[in-house]
Amino acid sequence: MSQGLAELRQRKKELLLESDINRQIIRVEICQVQLKADEWKRKLLKMQNVLQWVGPIAGAGFGIFAMRKRMHAQTSAKQNGDTRGKSSYLNLLAPLGIAALRKAYGFWRYARKRNRHATNGH
């Protein structure tokens, strides 16, 4: 009977050791998942920052393309006697200028709010 008890104790030690090893493996895997999540988060933040700048630039590019297309249409109208000159060019640029000013004002407000929170310790 003492031999059976010794075998059970030995088996218990082996199971406890295996359980401890499994816990450590799970901790390592959880840390790897956390590192991968942090890496994805950094990539998403980089992409978000890029999109904050690319979006308005692309919009301005499309606006300029549309403006040039419209100006070429007006050039053909000039040949027919309909002349508006530089004022029509400025009328086409005004929405782009207003959009750029709005975006710049939004950046300024955000930076000001962020600096205010940083100085208050929030």
Image (cartoon, rainbow, N blue to C red):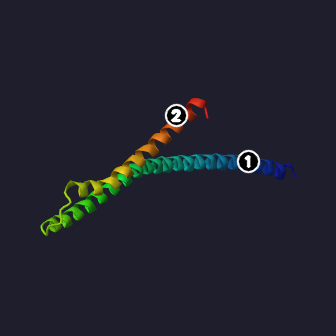
Quadrant of the image containing the C terminus: top right
Badge 1, how many Cα within 10 Å: few under 14, some, many 20+? few
- Nearer to the camera, 80 or 4: 80
Where is residue 15? Give x, y as percent. 73, 51
Between 45 and 115, the one lying in front of the other is 115
Identify the amino acid type marked 2: Asn
Is there CB contact under 8 Å for labels 2 and 1?
Answer: no
Disc 1 residue type? Leu
Q: Nearer the viewer, residue 36 or 48?
A: 48
Query: Which mark is drawn over residue 115?
Result: 2
Secondary structure under badge 1? helix
Residue denoted by label 1: 16
- Given the current orientation, which residue lies at the most extreme right position? 1
- Nearest to the eye among marks 2 and 1: give it: 2
Q: Percent x, y for residue 113?
A: 53, 38
Of the numbered discs 2 and 1, the one sitting upstream in the chain is 1
